[in-house]
Image (cartoon, rainbow, N blue to C red):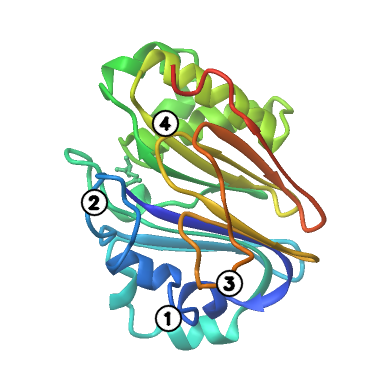
Amino acid sequence: MCRHLAYLGPPIALAELLFTPPHSLSHQSWAPRDMRGGGTINADGFGIAWFQDDASVLRVRRAVPLWTDAGLPALAATLRSGAVLAAVRSATVGMPVTETAAAPFTEDRWLFSHNGKVTGWPDSVAELAAALPVRDLLTLDAPTDSALLWALVRARLRAGSTVDGALAAVVPAVARAAPGSRLNLLLTDGETIAATTAGHSLSYRHTPPGVLVASEPLDADPGWIPVPDNSLLVATPTAVTVTALEGALQ
Ligand code: GLN
């Protein structure tokens, strides 16, 4: 399955997340360590979204492996941001490999990624999808489980949910509709990171005033803390909490 990460804190070069560390996101794209049986490498696309100084969001997505973009390392060494979400994709069998199927999915200040898969797709979640506005279904980023999860989360955010509240509502609902799904979701609004663990690995490193949440630790720093399965993580640069995500794996 995919690997993803999110960072909040003092501005850093994107390369510090994507390329420079020994187990950077690029390294995780071809040599991930903890895929838990969900695929082998993450070569079906990548995406990076980051806040700029003026609080606007820029995003780059491509349908090629992260390591094949020869121009990106130099760009990423130059671009700096204090709020970043990036992902590399391993497409679930049967799902299209297209640029728009790669996370992050974004709207306004919200950046979202999904690591995992919805079992019984698409029938298992047809009823949940039916509760969304038809327009949202007609404009899904791609006909994939991750894009539908984003639409479900986004509907909550638009209705006023916090980032963690949106995940805490959507993950148990999807887990009930599609038991056995893997639902590691990652979401930020540039001020808070929310993440769930349901079937896949996740770790965080809190070094105030910065916090980094990633599918796999980027280096051997002993400050990395693994997040137990079936958890909801809420992180800001000053505080991280991890609580049980009731009902996510029923
Ligand atoms: N099911 C997701 C997709 O196909 C895959 C995400 C993942 O973790 N591999 O996009």
Q: Nearer the viewer, mark 3 or mark 4?
A: 3
Amino acid type assigned to the residue bearing label 1 in the image:
Leu
Quarter of the picture containing the C terminus is top left
Write the residue at 50% across / 69% down: 218
Q: Which is more N-terminal, label 4 or label 3?
A: 4
Distance, label 2 to label 1, CA atoms, is: 20 Å
Compare residues 206 and 237 and report the one nearer the observer: 206
Number of dots carrying numbers: 4
Question: Callout 2: helix, strand or loop?
Answer: loop
Q: Which residue is mark 2?
A: 97
Q: Which residue is mark 1?
A: 72
User: Is the distance from the Cβ of mark 3 to the nearest ligand 1 atom less than 8 Å?
Assistant: no
Residue 76 at x, y percent in the picture: 52, 80
Distance between the alpha carbons at the discs numbered 3 and 4: 35 Å
What is the distance, in whole Å, between disc 1 and disc 4 at their CAs? 29 Å
* Disc 2 crowd, CA 10 A, few/some/many (<14, 14-19, 20+): many
* Residue type for callout 3: Asp
Is tag 3's residue or tag 2's residue first in the polypeptide sequence? 2
Q: What amino acid is labelled 4 in the image?
A: Leu
Q: Residue furthest left?
A: 94
Specify the label residue 148 is tagged with: 4
Name the secondary structure under disc 4: helix
Q: Amino acid at mark 2?
A: Val
